[in-house]
Amino acid sequence: MKENGLWSLICMMCLIMGLTLAQTSQICPSHDAISPCSCTLKKSGLDIVCEFTNLTHISDVMSALKGRTNTVIFYLRLRHSSLPKLQPFVFLGLDIRHLTIHNSSLAKLEESSLSSIGTGLTQLDLSQNALLSVPSSALKDLQHLLILNLNRNKIKAIHKKAFEGLDTLEILSLYENEISTIEEEAFTGLHKKLKRLNLGGNELNKVPTQALHNLDMLKKLEIQENRLTVIQEGDFDGLKSLDSLVLAHNQLREVPARVFSHLTQLNSLELDGNQITHVDPDAFIGLEAESNYAKAGLDYWIDYCGIMSHLNMEIHSENLQYLRLGDNNLHAVPSDALRRLHRLRHLDLRSNNITLLPEDAFTGYGDSITFLNLQKNLIKMLPPLVFENLNSLETLNLQNNKLTQIPEEVTENIVDTLRHIDITDNPLICDCELRWYSVWLGNLRDKDDERMSRKRTVCTMMNEHREYSVQNIPLERMGCVGKNAGRTSSTGNCHVYVDTMLQLLTTAIAML
């Protein structure tokens, strides 16, 4: 009995000693031992930073750290130093999880430079260095790498099997290199896990379709700030899981038919900052929502109080909700192309050359839009029913156009949902029709009210040749009392009626 108690005590003491040793090993070494580097103790391990130093000092610091058993270096950051070549086995004996070698003139890695930390390393940042190519031989043993950052190097081409061995990689960024060529098998081995690929800021003049087509797990592809002049059907074939595509700031002039037809899961598309003058009516085929009732032949509509409401019985697949077409050369809203996008929520058309909004500009697709940006165009007038279908609109930006009037009739269908409207920098004339703005602003609550009140939205009183704040127009002196007063949107009651009828019809159909 006593013997059993003795053994229990010994085991307990061994356990305590083991825990104490483990905790002791996670203590930062003294400043003198790792100077000129510094150390901070994080929850997951040590955070060591070495800046403005050279290879000799870094080698000495690594040697000092190797004598500490069971030490986890969660972050090792080597920044702004002179480190043109990474020596073989420089990290041998160390457990490093996140390694950064940034802005340190790194031009070459030996095959064995990183092999000793291959089982533990999950993030590697080699950005802003002097690499002329992907250091494939040094990377191939990084068996658990999740994130690789090669931004701002001097890589000109990605050769086949450049990332072979990185089966676990989820994020790869090659932003702002000089890449003009990507070979067909460049991303071999990355098809299992890669979710995000950034090829922005390079010299690509066409989409590297053959290199990309096997990346069927890819969620986000960024090819912004390249030299793309044309995109065509088939360019994105194989990217069946793609959720976000960034093609901003290229030299595209047209969005052709069916160019995105393979991207059935696409949720966000950025085409801003190009030279687009034409969007084909069939440009967004494949991005529209699929619906069960369409297949079953069910099609229920209600027309009441001038509102067309679709009985939403179907189960939609994910489709395009965010579309950016700003900073292009469009002369009209590409309505025919947009009418396929029944789930569109965010539409950005800022900084184009749109002069006219036809009354049906948003008909057929506008009922789900919550954000509409038309700022910095050349719009002179708004037809009375132009926003009639924007039943969900919360933010409307009309800033910096050529509008002189915004009649109450234009806004009465959206005031119930609108939380933010920007009509600044327009040559607005003070008249009774602008009364809706102060009424709407008075109905806002909390932060929206505060934010809107700070905007200097002004109009000009022509007979006085002076400006007034739109929310403080002298309505009484202008003879506006009685005019446009007491007018409220009738859509509120209509919406209630329609919603009730939709619920009743849904219940009735479910009972069939």
Image (spheres, rainbow, N blue to C red):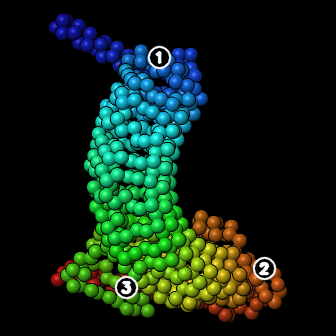
Indicate which disc, 3 or 2, sits on the residue closer to the N terminus: 3
Of the two numbered discs 1 and 3 in the rendering, the one whose residue sits closer to the viewer:
1
Q: Is residue 107 above or below residue 377?
A: above
In the rendered image, the quadrant that contains the N terminus is top left
Residue sitting at the far right: 464
> At which x and y percent is residue 63?
45, 17
Dot 1: element: helix
Pick the residue in front: 502 or 41. 41
> At which x and y percent is residue 269?
43, 66
Tag on residue 309? 3
**Gap between marks 1 and 3 measured at Cα:** 72 Å
Query: Which residue is denoted by mark 2 in the rendering?
Result: 467
In the rendered image, the quadrant that contains the C terminus is bottom left
> At which x and y percent is residue 252?
48, 69
Of the two numbered discs 3 and 2 in the rendering, the one whose residue sits closer to the viewer:
2
Disc 1 residue type (three-letter): Ala
**Gap between marks 3 and 2 measured at Cα:** 42 Å
Tag on residue 64? 1
Dot 3: element: strand
> At which x and y percent is residue 346?
47, 70
Residue drawn at x 82%, y 84% as measured from the top left: 465
**Gap between marks 1 and 2 measured at Cα:** 72 Å
Would you identify the image quadrant in which residue 70 lies?
top left
**Badge 2 density bin: few <14, some 14–19, many ≥20, Cα 10 Å:** some
Residue drawn at x 64%, y 91% as measured from the top left: 484
Of the two numbered discs 1 and 2 in the rendering, the one whose residue sits closer to the viewer:
1
